[in-house]
Amino acid sequence: MRDHADLQAMNARSLAQQQAVRRATFSPGEVKTLRPFSIWEISQFMFDVPADTLRKKLSDDPSLPQGETEDDGRQRWFSLDEINELRRRMRFRGRVLQPERPKGRAMRVAVSNFKGGVGKTVVAQHLANAAALDGYRVLCIDFDPQATLTHSMGLTEVKEWNTVWGIMCRDLCREADRITDSYDDPDDCPYPSASELPEDVQSIGAQRFQDFIQPTCWPTIDIIPSCANAAFVEFASAQYRALHKAWSFFGCVARYLEELPDDQYDIIIFDCPPAIGYQSLNAAFAADILYIPSGPGYWEYDSTTSYLGQLGDAMEDISDGFGSVAQDAGLTLPKRFADIRLLMTRFENANPLHQAMLDAFQNVFGADVCANPIEMTRAVEQSGRFQMSVYEQDYRQMTRETWKRARQSFDRAYGEFKDTVLTAWRAQSPRERGEQ
């Protein structure tokens, strides 16, 4: 017979192996670094100008970043910081290189589906990387206890109190005190104050909002990480909800994000767990846009259908059952999204079954389905194996056409994503844009 001790022992063995895998994946020092980018990449995929034109601009102005040459002495390579300086300082026939950034707070996108293996983390990672290469400042929030996005961003040691669980503990303390203070006589409050909550919750509740944000190997991408120990958040959240029945548990992350300065980030991307629970509901209520990846098979279609129904039912139940609690907490119900998009992943153009499933999605969901699916290529397979996105992979490690095909697939998907985000961004209310 086997019990929880066996599971814990298996976990310990796996964690030891996990460190070895990370050492092999990242570097001997277990620190993931972002590679430099060539003039060919910058001119073709970022600035959309001829490479010779870019070279001439650099030659004419030696004060601009000049990059570094490698062994052949011909090709120049630039860090992302250098690329962003070029964006700020260069013009091509009057065209600015900075991306459009409407006024107001960052736009929030939840990548969610409760079917495992449909590419949620791959999509979240690639959208974040593409946005960073486009000149945006990105915050990722890893809601998934598997912590794959966290690991792919180069973080290997994360404490559970620095995850979304910590944000929820902090929110419970703040909300408990707010509710207690709303009574003329605090002794009349039927709910506990923060000082009456468990000590571990109180200690985490004392953290500042910036304490949860960690830098990554990308200079313009930060992350609120996850870790395997954060898997208990669903159980803990249920316990906290039982302790304080007036706590609007589904609004923790939304309230937290409202504390961030409007200009700290441009885009915030949530990587959600393969479940509908406290964390995924927090992601949904904090998101402006819901992105739903799905593979090209019947089981994925079936699961996506169930996900839509169950998430819709859960959000309806919250709207019906927590209306007064939400109103007191300053939350608006029912929750409304600026857009909902379905994205086909692991797609093979030459596979007639995949095309048939894409047609089925489009017949049912119409324009809500992204026109550009994510193609399955060798470079995409390697992104999962080596915890590196297509954008992080060096095209010299494979045939350039293989890498280019994968990059263009993600670029097309990112182009649609960017259009969706900008449309929602421009449509924000004057208050959300920071206008009077």
Image (cartoon, rainbow, N blue to C red):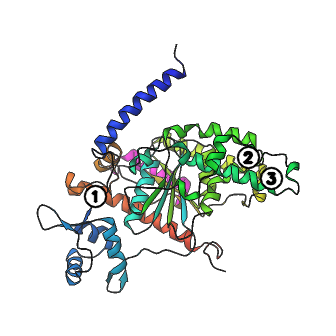
Q: Does the magenta stretch include residue 361?
A: yes
Outermost residue toward the top?
1
Mark 1 in CB contact with mark 2 (< 8 angstroms) = no
Question: In the image, 152: left or right of 293?
Answer: left
Of callouts 1 and 3, the N-terminal one: 1
Q: Residue 306 occupies which quadrant of the picture?
A: top right
Q: For label 1, count other residues whose C-alpha is less than 10 Å away and answer few (under 14), some (14-19) or many (20+).
A: some
Mark 1 → mark 2, Cα distance in angstroms: 48 Å
**What's the residue at 60%, 51% (across, down)?**
167
Q: Which residue was labeled with disc 3?
A: 180
Q: Which residue was labeled with disc 1?
A: 35
Q: Which of marks 1 and 2 is in front?
A: 2
- Under mark 2, the amino acid is Ser
Q: Main secondary structure of the magenta part?
A: helix
- Under mark 3, the amino acid is Thr
- Relative to 395, is 74 above or below? below
- Relative to 338, is 379 above or below? above
Of callouts 1 and 2, the N-terminal one: 1
Marking on residue 296: none
Mark 3 → mark 2, Cα distance in angstroms: 11 Å
Mark 1 → mark 3, Cα distance in angstroms: 51 Å
Expressed as whole percent of the image width and height from the top left, the position of residue 116 reads: 48, 40
Q: Nearer the viewer, mark 3 or mark 2?
A: 2
Q: Which of marks 1 and 3 is in front?
A: 3
Q: Residue 84 occupies which quadrant of the picture?
A: bottom left
User: Which residue range is magenta in the image?
Assistant: 345-366
Q: Is residue 215 visible?
A: yes
Label 1: which secondary element: loop
Expressed as whole percent of the image width and height from the top left, the position of residue 187 reads: 87, 49
Label 2: which secondary element: helix
Q: Which residue was labeled with disc 2?
A: 195
